[in-house]
Image: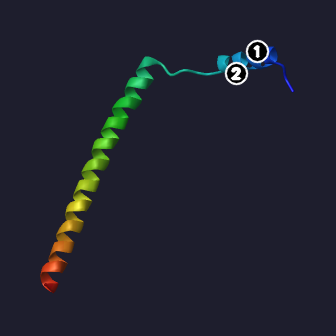
Amino acid sequence: MTNPAQFISQVRAEAAKIAWPGRREVTTTTIMVFVMAAVFSLFFFIVDLLIRGGLAAVLNAVG
């Protein structure tokens, strides 16, 4: 079992290994997230329209 001082020193050593992204990488990935969210929302909107139209056609044919 490690004592608190060793634990803190190990935490600092591990934290020093973290490679933080730069401003450009953060900006690029943020834009890509918004673009992909828009693409997927459009896709699911179209799928929803198709399912709703098909279900309405089936219900009109039955009833």
Give coordinates of residue 44: x percent, y percent.
Answer: 28, 55
Left or right: residue 39 versus residue 19 is left
Q: In this figure, which residue is indicated by the disc labeled 2?
A: 14
Disc 1 secondary structure class: helix
| Mark drawn on residue 9 | 1
Q: Secondary structure at mark 2?
A: helix
Circle 2 crowding by C-alpha within 10 Å: few under 14, some 14–19, many from 20 = few
Residue 30: % across, % down: 37, 30
Corner quadrant of residue 24: top left
- Residue found at x 36% / y 35%: 32
Residue at figure coordinates x 66%, y 16% from the top left: 16
Amino acid marked by disc 1:
Ser
Label 1 Cα crowd, 10 Å radius (few <14 / some 14-19 / many 20+): few
> Colour mode?
rainbow
Image quadrant assignment for residue 15: top right
- Which badge, 2 or 1, comes first in the chain's sequence? 1
